[in-house]
Amino acid sequence: MRQFKSLAPFAAGLVMAGMLTGVLAAPAQADIRIAVAAAFSGQFAPLGDQILAGARLAVEDINASGGLRGEKLVLEEADDRCDPERATAVANQLTGKGVQLVIGHLCSSATLAAAPVYAEAGRIQITVASALPQLTEARPGPGFFRLGPREDATAPFIAERLAREFAGKRIGLVTDRSAYGKDFAARVKAAMQAKGLSLALEREFDAGVRDLKPLASVLKGERLDVVVLGSYAGDAGHLAAALSALDMQVPVLAGDAAMGMEFGAAAGEAASRVEVAFMADPAAVPDSPAREIASRMRAAGMVPSPYATDGYAAVQLFSAAVDASGSFDFAPVAAALQSGRFDTVSSTVSFLPDGDREGAGLSWYRWQDGRFRPSDLPR
């Protein structure tokens, strides 16, 4: 998740007094506690709910098959509200409870704040959504792993499509004035330059402004062939609606921050004109085991998504690493995750030396029938 990328203090409340360091060992016949730590309230709650839904389904499946090495998995949820200070408190609470795996956090700043707590306490942490490069460039410890792509993968992905379909055309770049928007603009321009592409227009706007018709008028006057957009979901939807109101039939390629349910509500009938670059959906691949998981989630009234699939996969990875190492201790489990290759619903997963997933991919999504659906197969 690209939101809230400011550096949170690492020092505050790293480990509660008296906590044992580096131990995952579970007493005999004890439940194995794992947790999803994410936003379960506020604007990002739907994303946290998706991760939790996938993890919950995996726990149910593992327990139904006899548990993890004969022990029952117990899943907890912890709401950090995408707030760094609260994330630190959540991390201390979870480690104090003896949680052995944390799937989280969601927003990068929350993960950045909480990761040192888990590292110091010797807990496995697998983040599905936090994309800040620093998380693995300055890896907090050997138990930290990331399933989703880094945010610096998005701009080259967009630039590749621009070079393939819009070389020599008029390209516009529109971003909000948030930290995300400014970072997105810088990365896209660098990636375009590397492809020999240039901008015909660059514009910024204030996040949260609902009336984007003046901006849409400027874009129409520039006779652009494509617009690259870096903004959050609601603003992206309002811009799509404003462009449609002016009958501007221009393709819009957006960064992953536009991926949210509020996009559809704001865009209305114009929603389908925008494509969003987001983590690849394994369920879009024929014969993928993720398809079965997605079907089961729909049948249960849940929303299938790449976040849900990776939430399921994170539980699978921990379970497989415990089985491979023959231990619940932190060091052998972390080593097994680092060195192994594991078949999951999210395809075969292995990790690079820095904890990033090897070959984490992106895909294009378009709004259809009330939600974002892949508009291509993962690349």
Image (cartoon, rainbow, N blue to C red):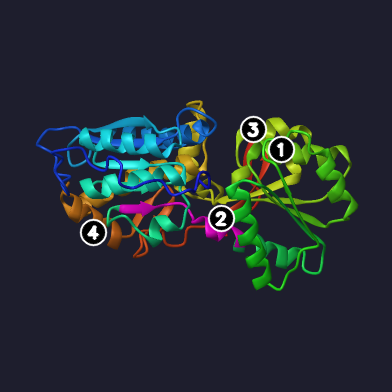
Which badge, 1 or 4, comes first in the chain's sequence? 1
Residue drawn at 74 percent across, 36 percent down = 238
Residue drawn at 42 percent across, 62 percent down = 358
Is 141 contained in the magenta span? no
Q: Residues within 10 Å of mark 2 (few under 14, many from 20)?
A: many
Answer whether labels 3 and 1 touch (C-beta < 8 Å). Answer: yes
Answer whether labels 1 and 4 touch (C-beta < 8 Å). Answer: no
Q: Which mark is residue 335?
A: 4
Q: CA distance from mark 3 to mark 2?
A: 21 Å
Residue drawn at 35 percent across, 30 percent down = 77
Residue 155: x and y in percent read 61, 60
Is 153 contained in the magenta span? yes
Q: Nearest the camera: 369 or 8? A: 8
What type is the residue that disc 4 sits on? Answer: Ala
What type is the residue that disc 2 sits on? Answer: Leu
Q: Which residues are magenta?
A: 144-155
Residue 237: quadrant of the picture: top right
Q: Nearest the camera: 117 or 229? A: 117
Answer whether labels 4 and 3 touch (C-beta < 8 Å). Answer: no
Residue 124 at least partly seen: no
Residue position for label 2: 362
Q: Residues within 10 Å of mark 1 (few under 14, many from 20)?
A: many
Residue position for label 3: 262
Residue position for label 1: 237
Q: CA distance from mark 3 to mark 1?
A: 8 Å
Tag 2's secondary structure? strand
Residue 198: x and y in percent read 75, 68
Residue 94: quadrant of the picture: top left
User: In the image, 75: left or right of 160?
Assistant: left
Which badge, 3 or 2, comes first in the chain's sequence? 3
What type is the residue that disc 1 sits on? Answer: Gly
